[in-house]
Amino acid sequence: DTGVSQNPRHKITKRGQNVTFRCDPISEHNRLYWYRQTLGQGPEFLTYFQNEAQLEKSRLLSDRFSAERPKGSFSTLEIQRTEQGDSAMYLCASSSTGSGEQFFGPGTRLTVL
Amino acid sequence: EDQVTQSPEALRLQEGESSSLNCSYTVSGLRGLFWYRQDPGKGPEFLFTLYSAGEEKEKERLKATLTKKESFLHITAPKPEDSATYLCAVFKGAQKLVFGQGTRLTINP
């Protein structure tokens, strides 16, 4: 399968715990995006990498959120001190330079109890 | 502020009953408009990119069109397997997509 993959697919955690999600983009894509989607809404942009450089962050990305893309390959999104409002689907997408078309992974469903 | 609004929020059709979904936008510097399909619990699946007013794209029973203010996704003679949420998103070249809230389409057999 050469699509975008995300792990884990589901995560249940208690309020105050830290969680980390992983995204593996399509291998030839140098751009990687994180979005968050709540029930009944479209995805909302969180952050974007070109290779290993994080080039844009949304105001939605509070200081409890951090994303990395070491070596310009896979990416991780960490949420520290989770809150119930962080419960959502976290989506990763990738694209190639010059193409606006973004291809999404299956998402990680986070539930904060 | 950039806005993307989709209507209706939900649409229920009988199998074979054609209809259209609307995506209206107020965006400066639009570089492209995308349509995605999303099944429950899954990530969005790319359908079409439209770059300029007057452009049309087709795929099976779906046809997407674009004007300067809105896009339509026409579905012809739909089947139950076309049931999904359809999302439109605008691209300004700043790399992020701005999505509408989606239209939840149900096709009854």
Image (spheres, helix red, strand yellow):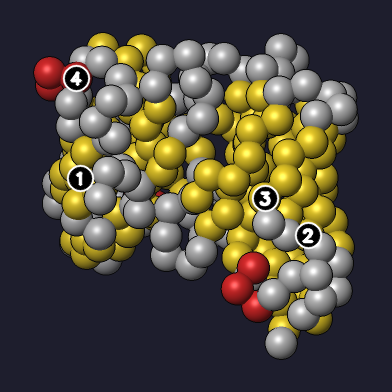
B9 to B77, vertically: above or below: above
Q: CA distance from mark 1 to mark 4?
A: 16 Å
Q: Please state which amino acid type lies under the numbered disc 1.
A: Phe
Nearer to us of marks 1 and 3 is 3
What secondary structure is found at the residue carrying circle 2?
strand
> Which residue lies under the disc numbered 1?
A21
Residue A53 quadrant: top left
Q: Earlier in the sequence, mark 2 or mark 3?
A: 3
Residue in the image at 85% along x and 74% along y:
B17
What secondary structure is found at the residue carrying circle 3?
strand
What secondary structure is found at the residue carrying circle 4?
helix
In this view, the residue farthest toward the bottom is B109
> Which residue lies under the disc numbered 4?
A72
One can see residue B71 in this view: no
Q: Earlier in the sequence, mark 1 or mark 4?
A: 1
Q: Are marks 1 and 3 in contact (CB under 8 Å)?
A: no
> Which residue lies under the disc numbered 3?
B59
Q: Please state which amino acid type lies under the numbered disc 3.
A: Lys
Q: Specify the subunit that label 4 lies on.
A: A
What label does residue B75 carry, if any?
Answer: 2
Q: Please state which amino acid type lies under the numbered disc 4.
A: Gly
Q: Residues within 10 Å of mark 4 (few under 14, many from 20)?
A: some
